[in-house]
Image: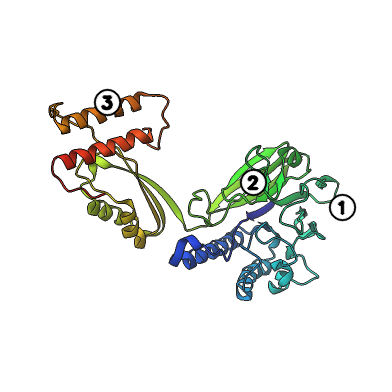
Amino acid sequence: MLRIIHTADVHLGARHDDLGEQAAAQRERQFSAFIASVDLALAQRVDLFLIAGDLFDSNVQPRRSVERVAGQLKRLAEAKIRCVIIPGTHDVYDRSSIYRAYDLKALAGSTPDDDLVTVLRPDLPSVHLAACEVTVHGPVFATKRAPYSPLRDLHAGSGTPPATWRVGMIHGSIAIPGKTDRDEVVITADEIGASGLDYLALGHWHSSQRGRAGTVAYAYAGAPEAVALDQDRAGKVLLVELEETAGKRTVRIEEHPVGATHFEKRDVDAAAIASQPTLIEQLARDKDPDLVLDVRIVGVRQDELDLDVDEMEKALAPWFLKVRVRDVSIPALTEGTLPSADTIAGAFIRDLEARIAALEASDSTTAGNDGTSSEAAELRDALRLGRLLLAGHEVSL
């Protein structure tokens, strides 16, 4: 059996300009997830630790950050767990590559005479690890955009010296017509199936995914910690077990959580909201500095309910990693007896309600997030404000 921890897209040193003061904290979460990945490898006593590209967010990193990474790789080396790394599209192996500027192998305590840490590069597209009975293939280029598919010339089954297991590493996208055509590195399912590999460790997509092409199992590990705060399937690494029994080869893949950031989508019924301060107080009770909270206010709201989503997001920001509030509720239509049609109020209400009814019954309108046309929703809001103004109430716009 061959046991592997597969990770990718760690993106250490990411700037996170959109997070403001929380950017530094998110960078620490990313490094903590990398440490947790190493911890898992040690606890599981795996044979091999694979990093399928974008270990670093860019090629411009301070030496102390590289040394910090090397310290974790040294932990693996001391436990005789082999580590193989390929550059990605953020830490591409170009002239300014971080892997040219720093000898990560040496910094991790691995010598030229051992195979404990290996960084694959254009002139070293594979490495044979005799202790693990595996050859790891990781074709990479010296440019961010690949001149051709990295699987084009890969025929793992014909490699020498022979190895029990054949594992590949690629940082790129599987071809999806109309979606991945412009990506820097693209491979096809047919190429994966013809590669002769037992397992292909993929990087570049930040969500954990897996599949099979012919006899080849492949998977994206996803980012071990969310790089952007809309990546709710990030936060994992993969434990991969390759086993041969009675001539039959099997590949088992398990997701293991290592990231701290978690996500919650919550719908709040507008009819149950007493006021904006009350809603803020209710949401703040679940404060969590690692939580990305996505709140959607739905349903029918009363005329008196006055909400400002920007104010709510600012008020809740100190309690969460990130908060998004969306108001897709709709104002109630008029209840009870209408004013006479001869009055301004009566004529106004009847006109808008008729237009709203026509729009909501029409199949030609564009539906919004709540299933109501955007024009109808605007008219409902205009009706609510108009009724309040005609009744002599002050209205905040």
Residue 302 appears in the rendering? no
- Specify the label residue 160 is tagged with: 1
Give the amino acid type for the residue marked by disc 1 in the picture: Thr
**With respect to residue 302, does 255 lie above or below?**
below
Q: Judge depth for marks 2 and 1 and give the one in front.
A: 2
**With respect to residue 150, does 115 lie above or below?**
below
Q: Disc 1 on helix, strand or loop? A: loop
Who's the residue at 64% across and 71% down the image?
A: 66
Locate residue 375, reporting x and y percent.
36, 34
Quadrant of residue 157 within the rendered picture: top right
Locate residue 156, reporting x and y percent.
81, 47
Other-residue count near label 1 (Cα within 10 Å), few / some / many at <14 / 14–19 / ≥20: few
Q: Nearer the viewer, residue 346 or 131?
A: 346
Q: Disc 3 on helix, strand or loop? A: helix
Judge left or right: residue 304 versus residue 216. Answer: left
Residue that mark 2 sits on: 219
Who's the residue at 13% across and 44% down the image?
A: 392
Q: Judge depth for marks 3 and 1 and give the one in front.
A: 3
Q: Judge depth for marks 3 and 2 and give the one in front.
A: 3
Locate residue 311, reporting x and y percent.
31, 56
Give the amino acid type for the residue marked by disc 2 in the picture: Ala
**With respect to residue 336, does 228 lie above or below?**
below
Give the amino acid type for the residue marked by disc 3 in the picture: Ala
